[in-house]
Image (tube, rainbow, N blue to C red):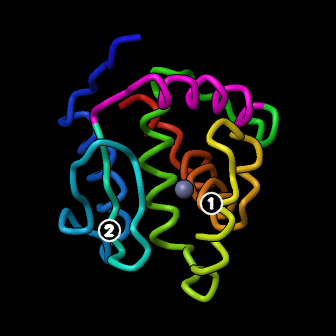
Amino acid sequence: MENKYLDYKRLYKVVDYVIDKYPELNRESFEEGSMFIYYPEERKIQISNVIDEIEFEGNKFLEKYLYEEFDLYIPQDKMFIFSILHEIGHYFTFDMNNFDEYCRMLRELSDENYTEYRKIPEEYKADKWAIEFIKNNKNILSI
Ligand SMILES: [Zn+2]
């Protein structure tokens, strides 16, 4: 599968929507890169316009998982919104006391084990934060 690319302008619409509600966040909290990831030590949120094969498979999984687990339906073409909110969720919920344990759990995980990944406590907390945000701000899904 070829990589697909999102429009960064669209990504920043999501970012700005959240910044507007949480003044402690600003554009400086974000950086652009090759994937969606949160760096707990720097408290930096990386966003990405690339949907590669792994991301695509992950989004397919998420569509089903979020519906079954949280009763929230997000179509795959809107999953980048959830991905951004998930990383922002880490920003607000990550407990540095769990950092070593978190890294250990990530290391022990096999690459394709999406379900186990979502059960890692810090990941689950970030999911919960993102889901709450979407449920309270339904129009964000129209971005
Ligand atoms: Zn995460």
Position of the C terminus, as image quadrant, is top left
Q: In this view, does 5 lie above or below 110?
A: above
Rendering coords of residue 112 (x, y %): 66, 36
Q: Residue 32 or 13: which is nearer the viewer?
A: 32
Residue drawn at x 77%, y 36% is 71
Q: In this view, does 46 lie to the left or right of 111?
A: left
Horizontal arrangement in the rendering, residue 125 relative to residue 35 (left or right): right
Decide which of tag 1 and tag 2 comes sooner along the chain: 2
Q: Does the residue labelled 1 lie within 8 Å of ligand 1?
A: no
Q: In which quarter of the image is residue 120?
A: bottom right
Q: What element carries label 1?
A: helix
- Magenta segment boundaries in residue numbering: 49-67
Residue holding disc 2: 44
User: Extreme bottom residue here?
Assistant: 97
Marks 1/2 in contact by CB < 8 Å: the verdict is no
Residue 83's x, y, as percent?
A: 47, 43
Horizontal and vertical percent for residue 19?
30, 62
> Looking at the image, how many numbered discs can be counted on the residues?
2
Tag on residue 64?
Answer: none
Dominant secondary-structure state across the stretch colored magenta: helix
What amino acid type is highlighted by mark number 1?
Leu
Please tell me which residue lies in front, 76 or 14.
Answer: 76
Q: Which residue is at a point 51% across and 66% down the rendered structure image?
A: 90
Q: Residue 21: horizontal and vertical position, in percent?
A: 37, 64
The quarter of the displayed image where residue 95 is located: bottom right
Report which residue position mark 1 lands on.
Answer: 106
Verify whether residue 18 appears in magenta.
no
Q: Is residue 133 above or below residue 73?
A: below
Please identify, in this view, whether the residue under mark 1 or under mark 2 is nearer the observer: 1
